[in-house]
Amino acid sequence: MKNVKRIIIPALGLLIGTILLTASDHVDAPSIINSTADVSDFYAFESEATPSNMVFIVTSQGILSPTESETANFDQNVLYEINIDNTGDNVEDLVIQMIRRGNWMHFFGPVTPQETGLRGTIVSDANFQERVLITPYQEDDIILETETGWKYFAGVTEDPFFFDIARFRQVIAGDVDRFNTPGNDTWNGLNVLTIAIELPKRLLGNGDSINAWITANRKQN
């Protein structure tokens, strides 16, 4: 099973100010929804504190109630990959791989993938490797920051995606005036599993732009 979210990041080497791009899908196809490989959102933006860094955030297994959040965890048989195309051919040139092992989230890359397309294999000899303890629900965030400025996080967080389903339906029905009225967050009080990494943009390619997408691959027996 492979779940894909795609995002295009323009002018990577020339980003000015804070740019936030997201790909969202809180309601997936029947074969994906409510599974531990369900990807909710993919965010990519320039670090405000360090403009030479890029931040990638992946959320999955939404929409979690507080009760569900107490036991929710990443599936050890699901490999998340941030795929990066820096040549414009829509084929990943680099991947950042993330997989849970015990109480830790392990990160590999960015690194050239061993294979592209619909299969994912962990590049266990990647030059860049790190791990961070997974933050349990309602505990202080455990963020690993390396001496070189990389940052890593994995754990349960409040769902950052804002969407008003009721008002959306009213707009679709033709009540356009309601579109500009402040709405209510349908996801308020709900949570997601979140993985985040901050790293230097120079490691993602030398071109003017990149394509990036997230995939979730389940281990095949």
Image: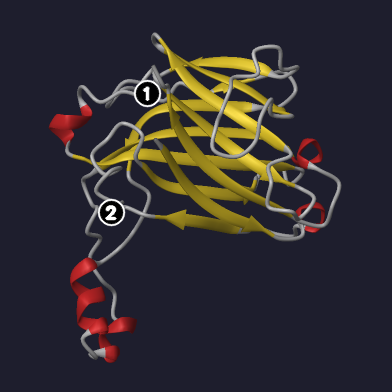
The label nearer to you, 1 versus 2, is 2
Q: Which mark is residue 161?
A: none
Q: Looking at the image, tell me whether mark 1 or mark 2 is earlier in sequence order.
A: 2
Above or below residue 48? Residue 10 is: below
Residue receiving disc 1: 140
Residue 98 in the image: x percent, y percent? 53, 25
The quarter of the picture where residue 142 lies is: top left
Q: Secondary structure at mark 2?
A: loop
In x, y percent, where is residue 182? Answer: 29, 74
Tell me the element at label 1.
loop
- The picture quadrant where one finds residue 68 is top left
Task: Specify few, some or many for label 2: CA neighbours under 10 Å numbering under 14, 14-19, or 20 or more.
Answer: some
Left of 20 or right of it: where is 154? Answer: left
In the picture, measured across the screen, residue 196 lies left or right of residue 55, that is left
* Amino acid type of the residue that numbered disc 1 sits on in the rendered structure: Asp
Q: Residue furthest left?
A: 67
Camera sees residue 18: no
Q: Residue at position x 62%, y 31% from top? A: 96
* Residue placed under numbered mark 2 in the picture: 27
Residue at image position (49%, 27%) is 153
Whether residue 10 is visible to the viewer of this picture, yes or no, is yes
* Residue pictured at 26% horizontal, 44% vertical: 33
